[in-house]
């Protein structure tokens, strides 16, 4: 928090532009973008560490590896104590989404406590997985610094949920193949394998706490389904955005992989007999609110989770007409 030292542990964008002009030009040429576009993407992926609420820094390890590999990869997992963090998350049944936009006091930022006895937010703040997003008049906001760290946390969560490393690798392959080849049934299979592994009873307390803090309007089970599926996509290296707004509303997930874009509306049925009605509701909502308008050529996809089975039991691409229940 010392203004004289706040830029010491990282690279500012000005320094990157000044000292790496050849790397920027060569990487931009290889990726087929302009230097300005490359810096914009780098800013979202590797920038964002902040120690005073004002100045933002790139992670040097990730930045140098990016220029060496010339690909947007999650190098963070190679530099941090990922096993330690993974065990910490698993032991406490923590989720990724509960650490978004957390308000904290100035005292917390300056004195987050001893790392072995700190709160989860304090622990992740001191280990670099959370950073100061902004400084307000009364407090500070903590969040993940950038896409790389958010993806890394998501991968740790997904690996912790699944019984072993092979399970994660197999599901990741299934997910990526289904998205690349537009195989909806295989996508449903991959997501159901994930859902089958989640100890929801253990995660309910974390979900309840997050909803109380952030004032979510949907039930805790629905929040857990959405946040876990979102983290799984991120952890598998898929470009995904949540709650993307249009002029009439917002879609649950917008997923992009290898030129294919999917606009996904998730619904949870708390009784099996409600699944068909929820499917129609999801399809009509996407159609009526024009969720696909910003994404030409995208596939609209309605998915319904039967909470009694904790599985996606219905998936259907969006058609042209509104549907009615029979």
Image: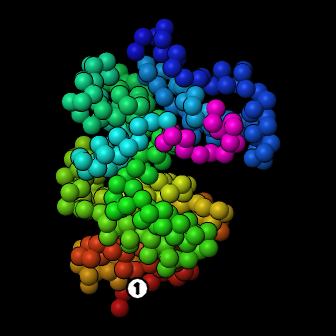
Q: Main secondary structure of the magenta part?
A: helix
Q: Residue at x 38, y 66 (%)?
A: 194
Residue 115: quarter of image: top left
Q: Quadrant of the N terminus?
A: top left
Residue 118: quarter of image: top left
From the image, tell me which residue sits under label 1: 324
Relative vertical location of residue 202 with respect to residue 13 in this rendering, above or below: below
Residue 173 percent coordinates (x, y): 53, 66
Relative vertical location of residue 241 with respect to residue 153 in this rendering, above or below: below
Assess disc 1: are there few (<14), some (14-19) or many (≥20) residues with their C-alpha within 10 Å of its C-alpha. Answer: few
- How is the protein colored in the picture? rainbow
Q: Residue at x 48, y 67 (%)?
A: 170
Relative vertical location of residue 215 with respect to residue 229 in this rendering, above or below: above
Does the segment drawn in magenta span residue 71?
yes
Q: Quadrant of the C terminus?
A: bottom left
Read off the magenta span: 64-78
Pick out the residue farthest to the bottom. Answer: 326
| Count of numbered labels shown in the rendering | 1
């Amino acid at each position: 928090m010392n203004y004289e030292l706040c830029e010491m542990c990282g690279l500012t964008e000005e320094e990157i532009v000044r000292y790496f002009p050849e790397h920027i030009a060569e990487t931009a040429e290889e990726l087929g973008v302009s230097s300005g576009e490359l810096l914009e993407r780098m800013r979202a992926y590797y920038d964002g560490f902040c120690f005073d609420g004002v100045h933002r820094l790139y992670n040097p390890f990730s930045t140098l590896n990016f220029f060496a590999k010339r690909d947007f990869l999650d190098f963070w997992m190679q530099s941090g104590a990922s096993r330690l963090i993974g065990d910490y998350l698993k032991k406490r049944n923590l989720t990724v989404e509960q650490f978004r936009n957390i308000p904290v006091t100035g005292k917390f930022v300056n004195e987050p406590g001893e790392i072995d006895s700190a709160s989860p937010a304090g622990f992740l703040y001191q280990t670099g997985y959370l950073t100061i997003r902004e400084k307000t008049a009364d407090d500070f906001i903590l969040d993940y610094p950038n896409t790389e760290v958010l993806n890394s946390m998501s991968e740790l969560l997904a690996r912790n949920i699944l019984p072993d490393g092979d399970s994660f690798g197999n599901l990741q392959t299934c997910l990526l193949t289904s998205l690349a080849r537009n195989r909806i049934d295989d996508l449903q299979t991959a997501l159901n394998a994930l859902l089958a592994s989640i100890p929801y009873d253990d995660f309910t307390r974390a979900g309840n706490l997050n909803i109380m803090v952030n004032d979510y309007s949907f039930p805790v089970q629905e929040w857990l389904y959405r946040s876990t599926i979102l983290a799984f996509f991120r952890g598998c290296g898929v470009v995904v955005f949540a709650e993307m707004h249009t002029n009439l509303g917002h879609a649950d997930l917008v997923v992009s992989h290898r030129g294919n874009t999917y606009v996904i509306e998730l619904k949870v049925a708390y009784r099996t007999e409600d699944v068909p009605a929820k499917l129609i509701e999801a399809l009509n909502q996407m159609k009526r609110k024009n969720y696909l308008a910003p994404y030409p050529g995208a596939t609209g996809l309605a998915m319904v989770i039967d909470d009694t089975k904790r599985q996606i039991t219905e998936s259907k691409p969006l058609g042209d007409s509104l549907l009615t229940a029979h």
